[in-house]
Image (cartoon, rainbow, N blue to C red):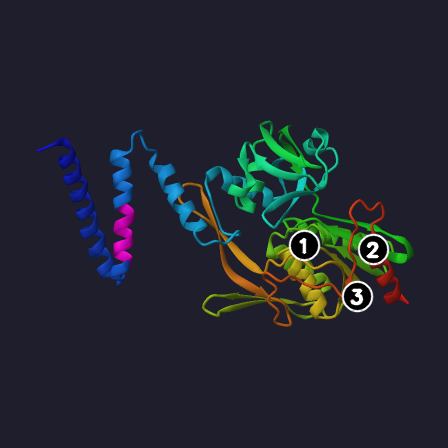
Amino acid sequence: MSKKKIIIGVLLTAVLSSFLTIAGLCFAFGIHSNEVADIVRFLGVKRFIEARYVSDVNETKLMDGAISGMVQSLGDPHSLYMNADRFEQLKEHTEGEFGGIGVTMGFKDSKVTIISVLDDTPGQHAGLEAGDEIMAVDGTPVSEMQPEEVAMHIRGEVGTKVVLTIERDGETQDYTIERATIKIDTAKGTMLEDGMGYIRIASFSENTGKEFKAAYDSLEEQGMKGLIIDLRENPGGLVTSCVEIANMVVPKGPIVSVVERDGSKEVHESKLEESKYPIVVLIDGNSASASEILAGALQDTGAATLVGTKSYGKGSVQVVVPMLHDDGLKLTIAKYYTPNGRCIDGTGIEPDVEVELPEGATTDVQLEKAKEVLKEKLQ
């Protein structure tokens, strides 16, 4: 008998053995025959690769790739498999401190654009500018990555380098940038003229609720009469932090309803008896997720006037699940609805007062309009 026939015979025996074992387990647990066939098909391919691929196979990488491909097949840009390194980066980012280059990115129409560059960060020192389009990260085109993957590839261990391919004014150039520790103060406040308080929320991380409260309390001590909340370029983050802030500004009642596939619903509610101050909220096309939850709750309850442009339209909820090899899975499990029952996934929130920010404008016309609207409320 030829060597080839012996190998095929061994493989068939292994697959048959796996089939019988799996079939017995599936029967015991009431799993259908189609599912059994799919499991056997998967294991058959795995065994064949391990036995016949021309080079040695790393079994962990093989499984990582299989899981990643399974998640990508959902066609959902917000669901993502993360290996151990990527999962650690995600955890560091939600804690508010991580290795990166200090840029905020916007994801729209399959393009990745730099929205802003933080002061005194590697990105600023390298010469990156708002409006730059990121074409590739370390030679991999961003078109081959999901939005979450682009951000995670740019982040990394402090002291390591990342190469960004940037297109600006029709010309392409590579920028080699060394990552540094980026500490983000996600909520900052300042007092404007005529008793108008202003709080900018950059994202919703673990400490954002505390930072917002500190800014809010400070403005109160300075005699705040009305408040502008700036959610522009805020990609979202932790819903828990969003709800924490909503309890300071949204009147008593529903903040957001989270509805899963089976129709089960979880309602987050505010316990605030009534709003203490008139509020204006700034939003734009990069205000997403938790930003839209807060803006939608304030708009639906009549507690605020929204100024700016239509928000991004990410009305889905993801859960992050730790796995067995220090890796993790980020999976869309539900959609959220505003207090009035609006699902804004894919549509966004329309502002009450629409104001475009002209390209290259030297004056923040959106903020000026927000101040004008708040002044009218204070009269």
Does residue 225 appear to the left or right of 90 in the view shown? Answer: right
Residue lying furthest left: 1
Discs 1/2, front? 1
Q: Quadrant of residue 354?
A: bottom right
Give SS at disc 1. Answer: loop
Residue bearing the label numbered 3: 276
Residue bearing the label numbered 1: 287
Residue 318: x percent and y percent?
A: 52, 55
In the image, what residue type sits under mark 3? Answer: Lys
How many numbered badges does the structure rendering display?
Answer: 3
Residue 359: x percent and y percent?
A: 78, 47
Give SS at disc 2. Answer: strand
Residue at screen point 84% across, 45% down: 362
- Mark 3 touching mark 1, by CB under 8 A? no
Q: CA distance from mark 2 to mark 3?
A: 13 Å
Q: Quadrant of residue 3?
A: top left
Residue bearing the label numbered 2: 197
The stretch of residues the image draws in magenta is: 35-43
Residue at screen point 53% across, 46% down: 146
